[in-house]
Image: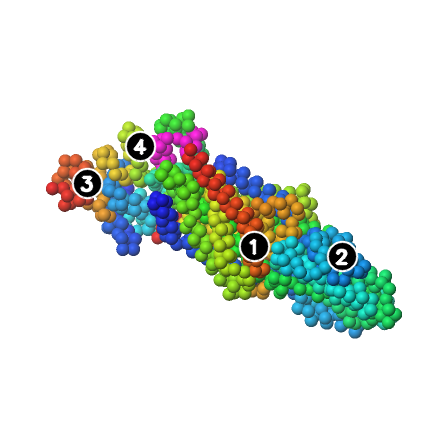
Amino acid sequence: MRAFLGFVRKETLHLLRDRQTLAILLLFPVVQVLIFGFAVRTDVEDVAIAIVDPTPDVATLNLRERIAASDRFHIVGVTTSTRGLDARFRDGSVRQALLLPTDMQRRIGRGDSLSLQLLTDGSDPNTGGIMQGYATAIVDRWYREVVPQRGVLRIETQSRMRYNPTLESAHLFVPGLVAFVLTIVSALMTAISISRERETGTMEMLLVSPIRPVAIVAGKVIPYIVLGFVSVLLVLVAARTVFDVPLRGSLVLLLAESGLYIITALALGVVISTKAPNQRTAMIAALAGLLLPTMILSGFIFPIDSLPRPLQLLSYIVPARWFLVIVRGIMLKGAGLATLWQETLVLVGMTLLFLVRGSRGLAIRLG
Amino acid sequence: MRTVFFLVRKEFLQIFRDRTTVFQILLIPVVQLLVLANAATFDVKQVAMMVVDEDRTTVSVGLVQRLEGGRQFRVVRYEPTDAGVDHALLDREVTAVLHIPRHFEEDLVRRGWAPVQLVLNSEEGATAGIVQSYALSILGAYARELDRTLPRLEATRTVRVAPLDLRTQRWFNPTRNYKHWMVPALMVSLTTIIGLLLTAQNITRENELGTLEQLNVTPMTKVQFIAAKLIPFWLLSLLIFTIGLTIGKLVFGIPMRGNLLLVYLAAMVYLVVVLGLGLWISTITRTQQQAMFVAFFVILIFLLMSGLFTPVDSMPRWAQYAAEANPVKHFVAVMRAVLVRGAGLETVGRPILGLGVAGIGVLALAVGRYRKSVA
Amino acid sequence: MTHAIETRELTRRFGDFTAVDAITFHVEPGEVFGFLGANGAGKTTAIRMLIGALAPTSGSATVAGYDIRTQAEQVRRRIGYMSQKFSLYEDLTVRENITLYGGIYGVSTRDIVTRTGDILARIGLEHAGDELVREIPLGWKQQLAFSVALLHRPDIVFLDEPTGGVDPITRRRFWELIYEAGAAGTSVLVTTHYLDEAEYCRRISIMVDGAIAAMGTPAEVRRSVGAETLDEVFLKLTRPGAAA
């Protein structure tokens, strides 16, 4: 036990002395949360729309005014023909175009059908759909008010968004960002530190000492746990103060789960380091191998429910996925352990699995 | 020049002798591209819905049937009261709840309109909006159907006036194929990640091993050194990029409407910037570990603020300005403009030029920062 | 004839710590000069200044007739260097290492081929030319590193503790290489803390705490300090009070 504590102490001092790494590990998550909380959004605003109005009259002007008044759109040009529209779509200066019929006011008076055409740049299917939805909604609203209709059957829908009523992007991304950054940083830390010891040969010295491999792994991991924890606290403070991300659940539970997750990620780093023959391989595996899959399959940006079935299954093995559910659950929904026990159990299981494989891997390396 | 040749030769020998690394840098992009291209979508399918039907009339049941009929919703719970709503939402058993109040049918027949309540789990906000629009469109269609078929009181009969015929068309991606959007994004990400990683730790590694000191004692110049470090990885990254494009075309059928040469020109210039950046990182860090962390930080910022996964137009003004300094953003924009929209040199000439200038700047930084001797 | 190496009050400070304290010495062309001293005495720092890897804080030096501060590039063309880690590329073969440095120093391809053959024959690695440096034994690695340092026929070669960790016979073989180089006109500045190797040098200097405490032929040094063996010299210089 004393040997173990001494070992932990050595690792801690080692970490504290490396000022640069310390700064990086503490600051990076916070800085990233700050930047992305502001910058990463899926809201669609300020769409560049062009209007083709062959015969401007009262009705078309009314519609044009409504579009101009909406802050979701800004009209980049009103023309009488579609000439040049093609090119403007292609070079990206126009994202949508609304083509109005001729003599609209007269058509309304006579009861003729009004055919409008809405062209949308669909190269990004996500924003394409949203832009189309907005424009359609404006046209619909205009139609219902300008063209008098009595008695059309309608179902009035009142919508309420639970947990995130304003659909604040930050509230969605910040918890996800915490999970994401923690994953990569933790895995990297241990992957590199362990493979570096192996490269420089000090690992062998440790392995022949009376400390058992499990203890070595644990000892290496402990200073980073504390560090990760401090990091998480800083990120949470930033999330609350800067972005008003709510914390509807228990802070204690959140910290406990964060602590658990840090260990999970660190343990993953250990496994990577035992499989990798040198530092470079460990780094590439941890960074290139984990970054995109974690970003994409954890639900951080793209919802899991939107994934095709095979990928949904694949996401089960991504630790960040489970942690994300937990963090969002606690922060946005006020969920407690009663609701989250399954996800927690999965994380615990993964951690144990990683730790066991990690220490066994180390023992194999020596033996 | 001869010196550069020998140094480049050495780099290649080292790279290809490291079987594991070669394996990794070729396999990781291919696997991730193939697997993840299917992932990136905000599309919603089979949303689990709970219906609280306090009316239980033919009309309300008809609405439930409409919801079930499409592929967008699965009605997993059908309740007479709203007692279990909170729990179901909390537990993520359902994503949406439709509450049909009493007198639904009656209101429609007598008044011509009836309220319903829709509650959505907006934990993952992006989809909540989409789920809402699906639900609304189904409700709207049902309302129009009832308008024709439901027998009603005379006073509220409709008087039809100029019907609205709004036709919508999606250009460039009419099939709404998410893969066409994601594959270029993934390709750029993967090439960038790997390129930046390899160069960022390269010089630091030589430093740690001591071979850097040996090189510094030779008459080799800083420019020769940086050039020799750049060229092999530049070629390698172009190879990875080409593999990605090939997979994109053969496996996913991504459009290639514009001139492929433009894409390559952009890629070549872009890679100089990225790799130069990696080399610069390598000159400012002391250990490989630090180099990796800095590289990760840079990669993350570049990728998330490049419009790859979330639109640049959605970012606040200041972020959009900042994004102008992001080489990834420009490269992605060029790629999408040329491949998806078929744009030509007039459109992409300027971003490419900008990347070129950035490339020269970054290399100058790296060369300037690198020291053959300690002051 | 100009000296191969000439220093004047060469000094290097790191903050408050003076690693090299105003050393003044010279090395003749073709001479094998031993740079002795305990670990941390300042030998490596001095060498790093002479090869242009570290800038001096004050003082001056010329190597192969060129000023180390203002004519560093010319210096680099005329010197060879073998560090303590012998910095060969472990993941390249013997031949590939030789070719690389030959190319960097501007040796013609034809000469690279012939000299590679010569080196392999001289140190006994003919059958190991295509082995990775990682795989060959330490003694051969040292000799190889030395040969690579001489590949471009420099005027002066700097060796920093080149024979650590091998048995005396292997060390002896290494010194034969050094003699050959010296006989061919190459000046050799070698640091070591093996005192028996000191006897192989024509002249030596002993550094203590950054300054040169004694200099001359081994015999001169022994006489000046009043000791029978270099061991005693060392003791007397490093712990003046201890030796009675």
Both labels 1 and 4 in a single chain: no
Amino acid tagged 3? Phe
Amino acid tagged 1? Ala
Instruction: Give the magenta part as a residue range.
Output: C129-152
Q: Residues within 10 Å of mark 1 (few under 14, many from 20)?
A: few
Quarter of image, res B150: bottom right
Q: Earlier in the sequence, mark 3 or mark 4?
A: 4
Q: Which residue is mark 1?
A: A338
Amino acid tagged 2? Val
Q: Which residue is mark 2?
A: B64
Q: Secondary structure at mark 2?
A: helix
Q: Residue C40's spot in the image, x, y percent?
A: 27, 45
Q: Which mark is residue C234?
A: 3
Q: Chain of mark 3?
A: C
Whether residue B262 can be seen here: no
Measure the C-alpha gap from mark 2 to mark 3.
Answer: 99 Å
